[in-house]
Image (cartoon, rainbow, N blue to C red):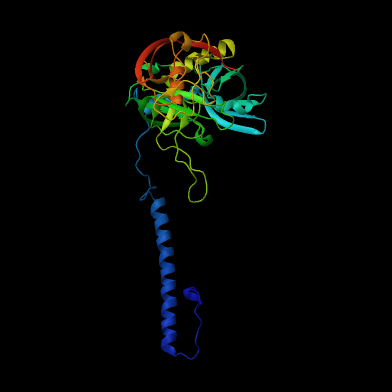
Amino acid sequence: MGPRAAGAAPRHPARGDSDSAAGRLVVGALVVALVAGGVGGVVGVQLERGGSFSEVRLPQATEQERVSQPGTVAAIAEGALPGVVTLYSSGGGAGGTGTGFVLDDEGHILTNEHVVRPARDGGRIQVSFHNGDAVRAELVGSDSGYDLAVVKVTGVSGLSALPLGDSDTVRVGDSVVAIGSPFDLDGTVTAGIISAVNRPITAGGEGDGSDISYVNALQTDAPINPGNSGGPLVDQSGRVIGINSAIRTPGGPDADGESRGGSVGLGFAIPVNQAKRIAEELINTGVATHPVLGVKLDLGFTGNGARVGSSAGETGVLADGPGARAGIRDGDVITAVDGARVRSSDELIVKVRSHRPGDVLEITLERDGEERTVSAELGRATSE
C-alpha cells in the first residue's frame, strides 16, 4: 500500500487501555500543537499591530541614473540599436527573416541579397524597427554576386542612420559588436573580436550557381546565427565596418538526424568599404557594377593557383578584354594579385571583386615554368 496520512491509520479494538492512552496522548499532542500555533498567531498579530514587529524589507542598491562608458558594449548597443531593423520577406511560396540597418534619413536600408530574395519577383518585404513599428518596404536593387541589397521605407520619421567606418583600417584583434535578429530574436547584441581580415569566402550556390557570392571578408568570433544576415558589425566607436553575411558550421546531421547549425565562432562580414560602393550604385541606378579581368578560368584545375582557360577546351582570354591587353594568355596560371597569394579560381574571383572597375592590379602568373608579372586595368560589367 502507498503512504497514508497519520490520522488515517485504522483502529484495532483488541488493543488495551495502554494503546488507547497512547492514542489519546498523540491526539492530545496534536491539539496542543494546534492550540500553541493559534496562541502564537494571536500574540504575533497583537505584537505586530502594536508596532513591535515590521514587514521584512530586503536590502537593494538604490536607484541611480545609469551612464554607459564610451566604447563599452552597452554604449555601442545603445547608440546602434535604434538604427537596426528586422526584415521579413516573402513571395513565391518562400519566406525569410534577416536584419538590416538604416543608411540615411531618406529611408534606405542595407541588407543581404539572400534576405530579400523571396520578395525579388513581386513579393512582400516588411521592416520592423527597434521601437516595434512595422512598415512595408520596396526593393531598390540587389546584387547576388556581392550578396547585398537596398530596400526603402517611406513615411517614417525619426530614422537613426548608422555611421559608416573604414574597413581598410580594421586590424586583427579589434573589438567588434554584432547586432541582429538571430532566429527571429530581434535586437540581439553579441561581442567579439576581428579574427582575420581579407578572408576569401564563397557563399550560396545552392541552385544553378547564379547566386554565389564572393567576399573578401572580415572574420569575427562574435556569435552570428541565422537571422543575423544583413546586420551591422560595428567597431568600438559604433561605426559600421562590416555587414554580417555568412557563418561556417559543422557539416552533416547530428545524432537525431537534424542538420547542425549556429555559431561556432566563425562568422564573416562584407567589408563596409565594398558595401558602401555597391549600396550607392543600387540607390543611384538600381544596379551594381562588377570589376572584371576578362578571362575565363578552368574550374577543374587542381593545381596551386587559377588556370586561365576552359575545361571544355575553349580559349580563356576574352578578345580585347583587360586580360588580353595585359598580355595574359590561355593556359597561364595566376598565382598572386598585388603580391597576395592566389590558391584557387574562387580566390582569384574574390580578390578581383574586392576592387573597383578601373583599378590596376599586378598579376603574378606562371607560363612555361617561368614566373612573370603583368599589370591589368579592371574592366566594368553590370549586374543583371
Say above or below: 351 vs 41.
Answer: above
Say above or below: 206 vs 330.
Answer: below
Can the viewer see residue 163 in this picture?
no
Q: How many marks?
A: 0
Give coordinates of residue 222: x percent, y percent: 40, 32
What is the quadrant of the C terminus in the image? top right
Give the left or right position of residue 327, taking residue 318 as reference: left
Give coordinates of residue 310: x percent, y percent: 51, 23
Which one is nearer the viewer's eye here, 370 or 51? 370
Give coordinates of residue 302: x percent, y percent: 43, 30
In the picture as drawn, the residue positioned furthest to the front comes out as 368
Give coordinates of residue 209: x percent, y percent: 56, 28
Say above or below: 90 vs 375.
Answer: below
Q: Residue at x 51, y 51 (%)?
A: 256
Can the viewer see residue 76 in this picture?
yes
Image-quadrant location for residue 155: top right
Which one is nearer the viewer's eye here, 155 or 197? 197
Image-quadrant location for residue 119: top right
Which one is nearer the viewer's eye here, 105 or 226? 226
In the picture as drawn, the residue positioned furthest to the left comes out as 173
